[in-house]
Amino acid sequence: MTEWNISEVGAALHQDALFWDNTLPWGELDRHREKCLPRMVVNGVDVVSLTLANDKNSLADTIRMIACERAHFLNQPDKYVLVETVDDILAAKSAGKLAVIFHFQGSNPVANDLNMVELYYRLGIRHMLMAYNLRNAVGDGCKELSGGAGLSRFGVQLVEEMNRVGMWVDCAHTGYCTSMDVLEVSKDPVIFSHAAADAVYHHSRNIRDDQIKGCAVTDGIIGINGCGKFLAYNEGTAETMFRHIDYIVELVGARHVGISLHFVYASETWGDYKTAWNVDMEDDPGNDIPWSEINQAEPEELPRLTEIMLKHGYEDADIRGILGDNWLRLAHQVWK
């Protein structure tokens, strides 16, 4: 067995593959966050996408955060590569550095100004959610009581502008009808950056089979998260992640699956989930579990996830795709 406590074959594959974690909540909790990225690296992560803003952030706060984080990573070129192109990702992997990209969990930082989309893209934002749980100018979030509002006229324009500049359109946290409209409107592949299959475990944050199939029709990707509240009844493990991976692979193929661990590295961050922005729906299971007690798959689970896929007979090429090559393919297809 290896240092990861998995087989030599699994460890070799995990180390050699490009591992892309497409969602890591990020913030100004300096006491914790600098301990998180080294944990990612020692467990095989090569690329990480950091959340810099969501639907609660103003334009001014968002710009300041981007400026701060760009300086933070650019000032440490020995450890990080701030990604502008696909080639930057491959160069970082070759040099043993962590490639860093940015994203928004919500579209409110655009502040109803489509001109902001290209500026954000040039500053490193590579994907953006349509809505974060609740309704915004684009459409419904997945926690709205009605669940029936579709994409607004402004939302159509926003999707079209994101397509134009090369930013991934992201429907995680987005309401069902809004996401289905997005899947029809977008000319580029659509992603659900961090999600799970509702058929495996019912929760308002998880996505239905027709959303999964619609995503695949666009040639998009569903990133499986590691939050125990969404994977099972408070079981955030490599095993519960695999159940959702395997279901989606069987439904639409390994080409359309990725990893977005959404590891909440600081306990203080869970306080943010006690607000109305993260309210549970009445029929959501686990309403009795405080957010502070939610179990989640941590970075140390990632090598085991590779081993589990090997043990279940997944081909090496499919495992490499799920670990990161699928996100890489989509970057080649969409980024400009």
Image: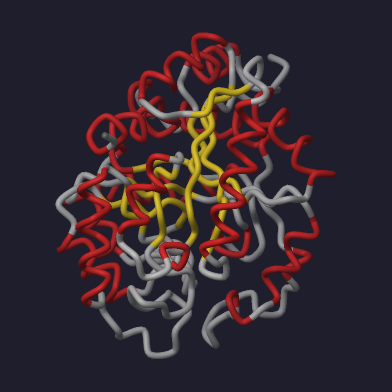
Asked whether, in this view, residue 82 is left or right of residue 248, the answer is right
Compared to residue 35, the image places residue 18 above or below, namely: above
In the image, 188 versus 18, the foreground residue is 188
Where's residue 187, x and y in %? 14, 52
Q: Is residue 275 visible?
A: yes
Q: Quadrant location of the N terminus? A: top right
Residue 240 visible here: no
Q: Quadrant of residue 183?
A: bottom left
Q: Position of residue 128 (x, y in %)?
A: 40, 55
**Closest to the observer, 13 or 78:** 78
On screen, residue 2 above or below 98:
above
- Please provide percent x and percent y for residue 255: 28, 37
Q: What residue do we see at 80% from left, 60% from top?
A: 268
Quadrant in the picture for residue 212 = bottom left
Task: Give the percent coordinates (x, y) of residue 269.
Answer: 73, 60
Name the residue located 37 percent from the left edge and 65 percent from the top edge: 130
